[in-house]
Image (cartoon, rainbow, N blue to C red):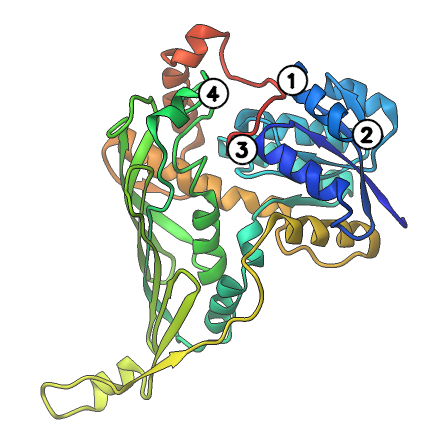
C-alpha cells in the first residue's frame, strides 16, 4: 500500500507523542487518521489539535469506522494483549507499546494470534534503534568478545518522586500496572540485555523490594542474579529511588570486555584469549595484554519514530522488523521470574511456572488499592503508563 492509515489506541503521555509525530508527517508512507480513548479529556486533546483525525470513545467504534490499516496500542499494561488481539482480528497491523503484557500466559496468547493473522506485529522497543546498543550487539554476534562469561547492568536513572506515583490511582499498583520498575521503567534494558548478548536465562534469584522508598504496592528496587544457558552469569540492578542514577552495562567474554556508560562505548580487547593465556603463561603473576579501544558510534539515540518507521516499512515493502512483536515475551518472562523468585524466596527456573506466577499475582491484585477502588484489573483504554 502507498500510505498506511494509522490509529492510536490510548492517548496518554506516550500515545500523544505517537499522535504528534505521525500528524507532523515524520513517518514516511504513513498518516494519522484516528485515535481512541475512554477519557473525554484525551479525546478533546486530539480533536483540538488534529481536526482531521477521527476520534472514538471505544475500540469497537474505531474498528467499525474503516479508517485504519494499522494501530499503535498504548493502553495500560493489562490491556496490551486484548487490544492487540482485537485489532488483529479486524485485519489491522499492530505496533504495541512495552511491555508486551503483564504475564507470559497473556503474551503467548497474543503472539499466537499474531502468527495466525498474517499481519505485521511489532513492539516499541525503541532502544534497539540506539546505535550504541546496535554496535555492542554487532561486537557480540561477530565473536569479538568470544564466549560470554559475565554481564552486569546497573540502571538506576529511572528516578520517580512520590508525586509521580500519586498522580494516578492506578500507578504503582498490582491491579493497575501489574508491577513496578521492572514492567514500567526498565523493560527496555531487560530487552536489550537479552537482545544484545543473545543469552537465554535458565535460573533466576532476585530480591525485589516493594515500596521500599515510596508509598506504593509494587517494586521500586531490584537486584537480580541470572544464570544463562552456556554458563554465563548476569546481575541486573534497577531502582526508581537513586539520584543521581547510573546507567552502566558491562559484558565480559573470553576475548575482552565491553563497557557502556551513556554514549561512551569502550572495548577492552585482549591480545590473547584468557583461556589461551591461562594455559600457556608461565610467569606466575600476570594477565593478558588488553587494548583500550574506543568504538565510534554514529547516529542519534534510539527514538520511537525509528521503530514506527521500520514497522511502516515492513507493512509497505516487507522490510525486516527490528523489534518483532513476539520478541516481547522474553522480557516479560524475565521480569516474571524476578518477581516470582522474590515472592517464593528462592531460585526460579525459566520458563517460569505460569500457574504459580498467576496465582501469586492474583493474590496481590485482590489486595490492591486500585482493585478496591474499582473492580479487578485496570483495562480501560486510557493514559499510557510511561
- Extreme residue in the left direction: 284
Give the residue at mark 3: 101
Task: Give residue 280's position: percent from left, percent from top.
Answer: 22, 91
Going from N to C along the chain, the mark reached first, 2 or 4, is 2
Label 2 Cα crowd, 10 Å radius (few <14 / some 14-19 / many 20+): some
Q: Position of residue 82 (x, y in %)?
A: 64, 25
Helix, strand or loop at mark 1: helix
- Which of marks 1 and 2 precedes in the sequence? 1
Circle 4 is placed at which residue position?
Answer: 176
Q: Earlier in the sequence, mark 4 or mark 1?
A: 1
Judging by the rendered image, the residue that carries numbered circle 1 is 41
Label 1 or label 3, whichever comes before in sequence order:
1
Q: CA distance from mark 4 to mark 3?
A: 12 Å
Instruction: Report, in whole angstroms, how far the alpha carbon at label 1 lies from the one at label 3.
Output: 26 Å
What residue is at 33 percent from the left and 76 percent from the top? Answer: 254
Q: Is residue 169 left or right of residue 148?
A: right
* Residue beneath disc 2: 53
Tell me if label 1 and label 3 are in contact, CB under 8 Å: no
**Other residues around mark 4 within 10 Å, as few (<14) / some (14–19) / many (≥20):** many
Name the outermost residue toward the right: 2
Asked if 172 appears above or below 295 in the picture, the reply is above
Amino acid at each position: 500500500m502507498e500510505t498506511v492509515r494509522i490509529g492510536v489506541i490510548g492517548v496518554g503521555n506516550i500515545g500523544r507523542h505517537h499522535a504528534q509525530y505521525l500528524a507532523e508527517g515524520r513517518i514516511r508512507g504513513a498518516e494519522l487518521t484516528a485515535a481512541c480513548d475512554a477519557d473525554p479529556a484525551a479525546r478533546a486533546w486530539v480533536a483540538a489539535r488534529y481536526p482531521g483525525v477521527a476520534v472514538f470513545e471505544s475500540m469497537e467504534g474505531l474498528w467499525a469506522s474503516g479508517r485504519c490499516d494499522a494501530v499503535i496500542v498504548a493502553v495500560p499494561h493489562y490491556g496490551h494483549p486484548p487490544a492487540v488481539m482485537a485489532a488483529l482480528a479486524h485485519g489491522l497491523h499492530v505496533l504495541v507499546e512495552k511491555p508486551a503484557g503483564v504475564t507470559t500466559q497473556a503474551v503467548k496468547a497474543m503472539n499466537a494470534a499474531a502468527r495466525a493473522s498474517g499481519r505485521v506485529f511489532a513492539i516499541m522497543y525503541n532502544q534497539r534503534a540506539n546505535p550504541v546498543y546496535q554496535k555492542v550487539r554487532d561486537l557480540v554476534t561477530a565473536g569479538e568478545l568470544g564466549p560470554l562469561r559475565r554481564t552486569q547492568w546497573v540502571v538506576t536513572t529511572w528516578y520517580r518522586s512520590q508525586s509521580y506515583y500519586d498522580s494516578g490511582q492506578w500507578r504503582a499498583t498490582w491491579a493497575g500496572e501489574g508491577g513496578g520498575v521492572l514492567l514500567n521503567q526498565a523493560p527496555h534494558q531487560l530487552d536489550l540485555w537479552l537482545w544484545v548478548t543473545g543469552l537465554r536465562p535458565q535460573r533466576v534469584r532476585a530480591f525485589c523490594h516493594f515500596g521500599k522508598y515510596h508509598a506504593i504496592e509494587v517494586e521500586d528496587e531490584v537486584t537480580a542474579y541470572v544464570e544463562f544457558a552456556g554458563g554465563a552469569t548476569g546481575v541486573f540492578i534497577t531502582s526508581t529511588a537513586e539520584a543521581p542514577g547510573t546507567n552502566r552495562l558491562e559484558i565480559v567474554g573470553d576475548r575482552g570486555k565491553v563497557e557502556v556508560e551513556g554514549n561512551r562505548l569502550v572495548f577492552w580487547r585482549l591480545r590473547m584469549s584468557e583461556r589461551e593465556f591461562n594455559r600457556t603463561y608461565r610467569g606466575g603473576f600476570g594477565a593478558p595484554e588488553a587494548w583500550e579501544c574506543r568504538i565510534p558510534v554514529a547516529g542519534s539515540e534510539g527514538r520511537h519514530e525509528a521503530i514506527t518507521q521500520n514497522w511502516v516499512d515492513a507493512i509497505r515493502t516487507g522490510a525486516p522488523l527490528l523489534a518483532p512483536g513476539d520478541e516481547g515475551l522474553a522480557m516479560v518472562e524475565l521480569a516474571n521470574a524476578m518477581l516470582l523468585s522474590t515472592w517464593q524466596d528462592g531460585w526460579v527456573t525459566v520458563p517460569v511456572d505460569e500457574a504459580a506466577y498467576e496465582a501469586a499475582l492474583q493474590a496481590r491484585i485482590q489486595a490492591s488499592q486500585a482493585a478496591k477502588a474499582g473492580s479487578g484489573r485496570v483495562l480501560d483504554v486510557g493514559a499510557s503508563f510511561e
